[in-house]
Every structure is written in structure tokens, then in C-alpha cells.
Image (spheres, rainbow, N blue to C red):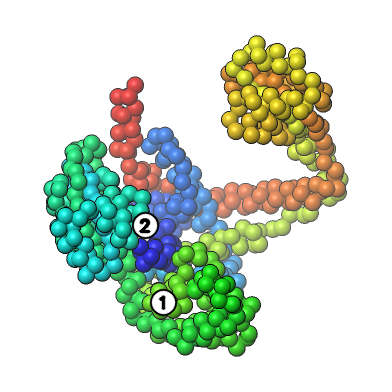
Amino acid sequence: MKKCYLIGLLILTAFSLGLMSGCGSSEVKTLAKVGDYEIKTDEFQDFYKNFRFPYATAQDEFDKKKELLDSLIIKRLLIQAAYEIGIDQLEEISRVVLANKDRFVLDILYLRQILDKATVSEAEIKDYYNHLQYKIRASHILVKDLDTANSLSERIMNGENFDQLAYEFSIDPSAKRNRGDLGYFTWGSMVDGFQEAAFSMEPGEMSPPVETQFGYHIIKVVDKQPNELFSDYETMKPSIEGQLKMRKLNQLTMEFLDEVRKKVNIQIEKSTCDYLMHKRENLYPPQILANLPKNDFDLEQLDRSERELILATWNGGQMTLFEYLNAIKQYPHNARPNFDNYDSLATFVFIIKSSDMLTNEANAMGLENDPEYKRKIKLFKEYNMASVMRDDSLPKPAPPEELEIRKYYDEHPGEFTTQAKIHVYEILLSDELLARKLAREIKTLNKFKEKAAELTERAGKRGTNGDLGVIERDWFPEVFDLARKTAVGKIGGPVVTQGKYSIFYVADKQKEEMKNFLDVKGDIQARITYDRKNDIFLNWLEERRKNTKVVIYDDALWSTIDKDRYVQADTTGQMGG
């Protein structure tokens, strides 16, 4: 389980960029032309992946994508202007590109070594589908080695209770609670070796020891039932294909990471570990030492030379003790390996340095020459050029004068007025007569709190004695409006809110208040400057559009939309109605 957890960390950290980048349709089409430049579907998908919107209809999706395409057209107009004035030659552009090249080369490494290879065939989908007709219930005993597994199998065959042995010997953490019972599951829920053995048996049968990455399993099938979620092939196909794709991605990722780890050949300096453990024993008395974890060490207890001790070496690099102890702070204590567990230490060093190691691997494979890398890095450079063009290369507006700033302040009082706020305690009741009775009888805040703790029906407020805190109108409009007319120290209501009756005690009030001009002067100046810069840009853009031929290909943009998905949704809605 620990190995799987560590590999999971690797997948999430080292390849997160690759997972997020995705890939569009294999067919590349031209969506728009800006002058002689063609905006193609791959560039649009790279841009579009940063935005996610809920779409009600295919037309809705088209309209939003057309807006985004127009944003890309504007970016391209800026890029063309940037090239004209030599922004591509600026040192700051080169620095930004150089600082980010590693993340793009990792992206391509994931694309070529994992994503391109994770193909799913029709035959695989159908085979998976055929396994989904039934669900089974099974129990298992998980142990570390084959000898233990064989010994337990023999004891079960001789009549000992499977559940009790699972409770006593299984290293599955849940066994102490469920005695090995995994409940019902369908095909695809377990790792390959386990599920192949489990689904090959009938209820009452027990498997010989089955090896997986977790250890050795003894599996007993308890029951077999029809899968109530099983449906026709076409309905289930997309989901199955997605599951198979993800399984292949995970499998290929782990295999590739194992391959790279073997290639870099991480070696732990055992003398450093021994020194650290010895120093630990000399620093603390036995009674404290017994409760200290062996997977951490206080950096403050190490002098400069000790911090520079080499903990690990590999082909092309090394890690000091100081670097390791600093890096492990971001990981939970129970995930860190002990300093006397060298294999786990090597795994953790790989996790910490995986980005560097994988970048070196990508460079060794020559992925900087990959056409997709060149395309992505060129776009990244050009988008940064567009930002410089817009922010730094267009004419600068004159700074606003004092009178303009004051005029804005006077003409927009609502922007600089804090909302009125009221601190109230409340009793919310379903019974109107009881609410009116309490409003008449309660005279003090302490009595109001007592009744609120006993009676209020607003969720979670009995424990706070009905305290709603300092409220604004947007939160409780009916209560707020009446509380505004109620004096501090008085009880108001009942007022209908959420279909119930609210009475309240007004504890304090904060009136609307206009912010001081000097306090907001800087904000107003920045706002006016921004608006002026935006006006300059819009005027520039209008002129640029007049002098550049822009063509949008609606049919090509429609081809990026799955219309059938919306047809199915409409049909489902009609049937439901």
C-alpha cells in the first residue's frame, strides 16, 4: 500500500502538467485566419482548456467558444504587432521562456511516453463490458510473503475460520474492522491479478495465493449477483473506454517511472544514515527516544558540516542531508520512510527529485526537437509577447489630476460606502403563536439566549444561542429590514422568513458609512488609469482590425462540438417530463 501511495504522489506531481494539457481531435482544422496566420484547432484547444463553462445547448457552447476564439484573435493581433516592433528579441522574453522550458519538455515526455501509447481497442472495451454482467462479494487475506500465504491457505483447508485468520494476520488496514470482507464489487474495481482470480471463481471457492503489487492475497468468493447497473453496450461504451484509458495511463506511468528510476540508479549513503541514527541516540534519553519517529530529524541539531553530508547519489546528481530534511516537510509524517529503510529512502529521493530526473531523461531523448514541443514553446513565447505589447508598448495615458479623482469620488458614492450591518440573535419557529408570545414575554438578552438554545429551528444555531452574528441585508433580508427599524436592545418580529417565523434581539448596529476620500484616493487613481489604458487599447484594436483581414470559419468551430450529447440530454429531459 505504501509503495502504491508513493507512486501515486509521483503521478500527481511529476506529470500533473501532462495530465492537465490534454489533447484535442487528431484532425487539425483552421478555425480562423488573422492576416496570413491560421489559428488551428490544436492552438484553440490549448487556449480553451483553461476555461470550463456549463453549456445548456450546442448553440450555447458554440457562442461561448466563438467568444474565446475572438479573444485568441485579439491575442494574435497583438503578437503580430509585437513582432513588428521587435518584442520577440527582448531579453525579458528570452528569460521567461528559458525559465519555463522544463515544464514544456515534461509535458512532451508525458505525451510521447504515456498518452500516445494509452490506446484502447474496440475488443478491449467489449471484453470489459462482458465482465460487467455480474457483481461479486469476496473476502481476502493479504500478507507480505508467499510462505505465510501458503501456511494460511493450509490452515483454512484444514478447517480454520477464514474471517478470524483475516482478522489476525491480514496486513490490509481494514481487516481489523471487516475481517477481510470487501463487500460487493464489479469488474474494474480491483487490480488486475486480484480481479482475474476473483471473477474466475464461484461462490464458496477459495483461490491459491495471488500476487499483486500489495503482496499475496488469499481470496474467497462469498456471493455472485446480477449487476443492476449493467446496460446496453452503446450506453456503457464511453464510460468503459474512459476507465480503460485511465487504467492504461496509470499503468504506463508507473512502468515508465520505474524504468527511469532504475536508469538513474539511486544509491543511499548508509554511513550518513548510520551517523544520523547514532547522533539521535546520543541526543535524547531512552524514554524520549522510544517515542521519536525514525523518519525525521531536527535540522537545528545539525551543524553546517553535518547538513552537507551526502544522503543519496545517482547518475547525474546527489542530495545532501539538509536538502532531504527540508524537502520532506511537505509530506505527512506517516508517509516518510525511516532512515534505516534504504529502499524506501531511495523511493522518496526519487519522488523529491523526480522533476529534475525526468527533465534530464526528456533532454537525453532529444524532446526539445519534438515538433509539438516547438509548437508549444513558440506559442508560450508569443503569448508573453502579446502581454508585453498590450501592457508596455501602447501609448501610456496621462495620470488623472486631483480634481478628476475627487469628481469620481463624489459621483460614485455607492462604491465607497460600507453597508449597514446589524448584530442580531434570533429564534426561528414554525409556530407563529409561540413566536408572538415569546416576543412579548422576553425582556433581556440572557433570557433570549436561553430560549434560542432551547427552541430555535435554524440549523446549527442552538449551539450559539441563536447568534446570527453581524449580518448584512443580502444574508437575511426579511430579518434585516425589520431589525433596521428596531432599536438596539429591543426585540423585533415575528417576521416570515424561509416559511417560518423569526423573532430577534438587536444587539448592535453599524450604520452605512462613506469611506474617507484620502483612504480611497489611490484606488480611484488606479481605476481611472486602468479605464484610460483600456480605452487606448480598444482604439488601437479597432484600427488594427481595420488593417488586418480576419476570417472566422464557423463550420470548423462547430466541428469541435459534440451535438449528439445535447440531443441525448434533450431526449432524456422529454422522457422525464
Residue at (55% x, 49% y) in the render = 546
- The answer to which image quadrant residue 113 occupies is bottom left
Q: Is residue 462 among what the camera can see?
A: yes
Residue at (59% x, 17% y) in the render = 430
The reply, left or right, for residue 201 in relation to residue 395 is left
Residue at (20% x, 55% y) in the render = 160
Give the Cα separation between the discs numbered 2 and 1.
21 Å
The amino acid beneath tag 1 is Asn
Dot 2 lies on which element?
loop
Label 2: how many Cα within 10 Å (few below 14, some 14–19, many 20+): few
Q: Which residue is mark 2?
A: 173
- Residue at the far top in the pictured view: 433
The reply, left or right, for residue 572 in relation to residue 545 is left
Q: Where residue 7 appears, x then y in whole percent?
A: 38, 66
Q: Where residue 566 appears, x then y in whole percent?
A: 34, 35
Q: Is residue 493 placed above or below 4 in the rendered structure?
A: above
Q: Which residue is mark 1?
A: 341
The circle on residue 394 is none
Q: Is residue 355 among what the camera can see?
A: no
